[in-house]
Amino acid sequence: MGIWRRLRNVGFWTLCGLAALAIAAPALWVLYTVFHQSLPVIGWRLLTHNTNAGGLKNAILGTLWLLFGVLVLAGIVGVGSGIYLAEFAPRGIGQVARFFSDVLAGMPSIVLGYVAYITLVVQAGWGYSYLAGVIALSVLVLPYIVKTTEVALRQVPTALREGAAGLGMTERIILWKIVLPPALPGIMSGVIVALAISTGELAPLLFTVGFTDNNPSLALTHQQVPYLTSVIFTNLQLPDPQAQYLSAAAGAMSLLLLVILILIGRLITARSVKATRRMAL
Amino acid sequence: MTSFHLKATPADSAPLPQRQGARARRALSRVDPMRVVLGALALIPTLVLAFLVYKIFSEAWPAIRFNGWSFFTTKTFTMGNLYGSALEHRNGQVAAGGAQYGVLAFVLGTLLSSLIALLVAVPVAVGGAILLGEKLPAVLQAPLGVFLELLAGIPSVVFGLWGVYSFGPWLSRSVYAPISHLGLPWLSAGVSSNGQGLLTSGLVLAVMIVPIIASITRELVRSVPGNTREGAAALGLTSAESVRVVTLPFIHRGIVAASVLGLARALGETIAVLIISGNALNTYPVSLFAPFSTMASTIAAMLDSALTDSTGMAVHSLAEVGLVLVSITLVVNFAGRYIARSLGTNVPIGRGA
């Protein structure tokens, strides 16, 4: 092999190696910054005290409570919508709905926040509230759930549906007993990703749920809800170092939540791979 | 059924009611309540989109009337004197005295920062993904996938935190300060001690969209059939030549699609830019190092104070900024989808995580 070709080969892979380094290094730096900055306040206090007492309990509870709302609202609408698009939609309607759902995915999140603020907080008179935030977040992740649900259902072999129809099963039985079970892991991992996105979002919540140092209440409207990304954002701008540590700690906590969600998603996907293999046999 | 029974006979007309019954039953089964419910749910994303577009447009309408064309040709965005009694009347619309709204500086900020992000992110993401996809042992692929997924999911406010505590100050100290001494055009003025500005924001945006582009590219690299690669090796190609001849032709369409997704994310990014941009108002960025603003960050930064404008024109003007942002994002989305489709692929949807 000529020396030039060999050199070019080495040169190419060196560049690729540098690129890989450029992916990993900033990411590790981000993680280091967050954990290093939060070291002074890491401890059980974060879980047992509220934000006005150097803890994050209310923000963690609020985030989980918001995620639950998204799970219910975006989950039901998104999965139902995905089922319709994959199984029942006439060609034309399916294409139109799919197209607009994709367009919705491209909406800047601050615009969602603005419209949610004007419509729900002001005009509907809910004030900064749980429901306004859940709706804004749900709109944000809805297209995601629709897409993953549809893809998961389309991966179920048509032969299964045909076989079931051939045995005389009704449409409803086919959907519930034949098509949904093998697609369920795929659908669930899509929902998990949607929850992961919701965990890290702030722009749609900034003007819809407000914040409070108290624990989140169960009220749907007129009660502000604390959440982690708000703590990061607000405390980051305060001059007090203790507040800045808490900001980083809230960042670390949302990263931890993210890792948990990703791992759950991976577990489910691994099971879905097994299920698909079983179907193929 | 009775194709050999060409002539109508009394026997033929007899079962007709029954057949009608069957048709009615079929029609009834077509309105299966489950289908209706699911179909109604499937309409929701479309209705929500229509509502969003209608709402942002109708909120912006008074501002569109008030600002006219100067909205697109001026860079000054000021709500005027919110506490004075003087009012500004224009085209039948009322705003606070001295109010003036121009979006140009924000449009420029959004486009420039996203462009920087894209120019930096695409080569890095593609180069890294090729290395990881082609050379990394299979055992490490799954953990790497989790790592990339985690990176793509890091909240943007956390990137903001990193940018303002670590990355920005470091850039300002170790990169911007020495370079600005050289006095080059575009690379001297406006350095702040914590590095808030255009280039910092562009680089942070790049870090944010790299995992998106890289994880898609890595999947593409891994989907290249192994035997084509073996064929290239059998012909005596080096592994770098094999990437150029075999891998890249397989994946270049997908890279375009992934880049469009990354660009769309950068255009709409709000919080990270809000923290790192320095929020310069009424000015174009004087250099790559100087503070600036984007459309998204301005909406987030000003909505609170805009609410105190009793004429409402400040809030309406922010809606008009949002309308411009939506239009640009949608154009990029459509153009990207069109290009991707003409190349025979699809733009994946999503916000990265």
Image: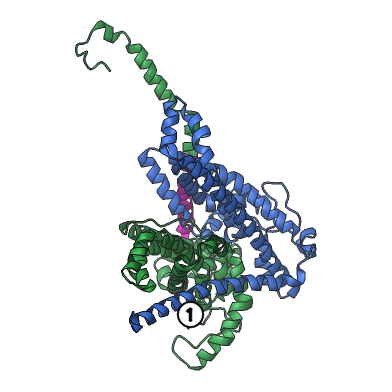
State which chain is coloured green.
B
Q: Is residue B16 above or below residue B248?
A: above
Residue B102 in view in this figure: no
Question: In this orientation, which residue lies closer to the viewer: B233 or A14?
Answer: B233
Farthest-out residue, top: B10
| Bounds of the magenta segment | B41-62
Q: Amino acid at mark 1?
A: Pro
Q: Is residue B51 magenta?
A: yes
**Measured from the top left, where is residue A114 in percent x and y?**
55, 58
Which SS type dominates the magenta stretch?
helix
Horizontal side of residue B259 vs B16, given as left or right: right
Q: Residue B192: percent from the left, percent from the top?
A: 58, 84
Q: Is residue A9 above or below residue B305?
A: below
Q: Given the image, what chain letter belongs to the residue carrying mark 1?
A: B
Q: Is A266 displayed left or right of B57 in the figure? A: right
Q: Quadrant of the N terminus of chain A?
A: bottom left
In the image, is residue A152 above or below residue B124? above
User: Is disc 1 surrounded by few (<14), some (14 to 19) or many (20+) residues within 10 Å?
Assistant: many
Chain seen in blue: A
Q: Secondary structure at mark 1?
A: loop
For the residue pair B67 and A169, the one nearer the viewer reads as A169
- Residue drawn at (73%, 49%) of the image: A217
The colour scheme applied to this rendered structure is by chain
